[in-house]
Amino acid sequence: MLDIKTLEGWLWEAACKIRGEIDAPKYKDYILPLIFLKRLSDVFDDEIEKFAEEYGDKETAKELIEEDHGLVWFYLPTKARWSNIAKQSTGLGEYLTDSVRAVARENPKLQGVIDIVDFNATTAGQRVISDEKLKLLIDTL
């Protein structure tokens, strides 16, 4: 179980990874959706494991969930699963934006919750937050 002190340290470390790229009040716009996506992915993985125990193997569990998204609390498209996000090294801003939007499309309850930021946004022709900083943030989470 995560205690408050550990959570504070974790959030501080995440904020330090993107310091300088964006204004401090906007940190939450980038960090919180990623934390939420990470949690959704962890729960989704746990649900796959549960089905794997019940039906014999992970592949069968994944096939069942792909056929019926209602078997899990929130369905995550393959692209939006944390294991795939963590492997991404180029075009990360676009990849993350596409991922959170895909989650919101699959789970209408999450529209306007998880897809609130464009990780690939630009201001005056410059990226608001670079792929390098996003990668550091993902590696922290």
Image (tube, grey):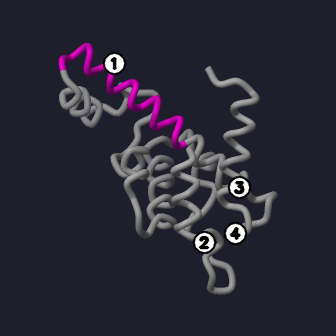
Give the residue displayed 75% in from the left and 37% down from the top.
Answer: 8
Which residue is the site of mark 3? 16
Please tell me whether mark 4 or mark 3 is closer to you in this view.
Answer: 3
Give the residue displayed 40% in from the left and 41% down from the top.
Answer: 76
Instruction: Please tell me whether the stretch drawn in magenta is mainly helix, strand or loop.
Output: helix
In the image, taking residue 68 as reference, residue 81 lies left or right, namely right
Q: Amino acid at mark 3?
A: Cys
In the image, taking residue 59 as reference, residue 90 lies left or right, namely right
The answer to whether residue 14 is above or below residue 55 is below
Of the numbered discs 4 and 3, the one sitting upstream in the chain is 3
Residue range of the region highlighted in magenta in the rendering: 37-56
Of the numbered discs 3 and 1, the one sitting upstream in the chain is 3
Q: Amino acid at mark 4?
A: Glu
Label 3 and label 1: CA atoms lie apart by 36 Å
Q: Position of residue 55 (x, y in %)?
A: 21, 17
Which residue is the site of mark 4? 21
* Residue 11 magenta: no
Which residue is the site of mark 2? 121
Which residue is the site of mark 1? 50
Give the residue displayed 25% in from the left and 21% down from the top.
Answer: 52
Farthest residue toward the top?
Answer: 54
Task: Pick the residue in front: 120 or 15.
Answer: 15
Of the numbered discs 2 and 1, the one sitting upstream in the chain is 1
Q: Position of residue 29 (x, y in %)?
A: 69, 55
Q: Quadrant of the C terminus?
A: top right
Task: Pick the residue in front: 52 or 10.
Answer: 10
How crowded is the residue under tag 3: few (<14 C-alpha within 10 Å), some, or many (20+)?
some
Q: Quadrant of the N terminus?
A: top right
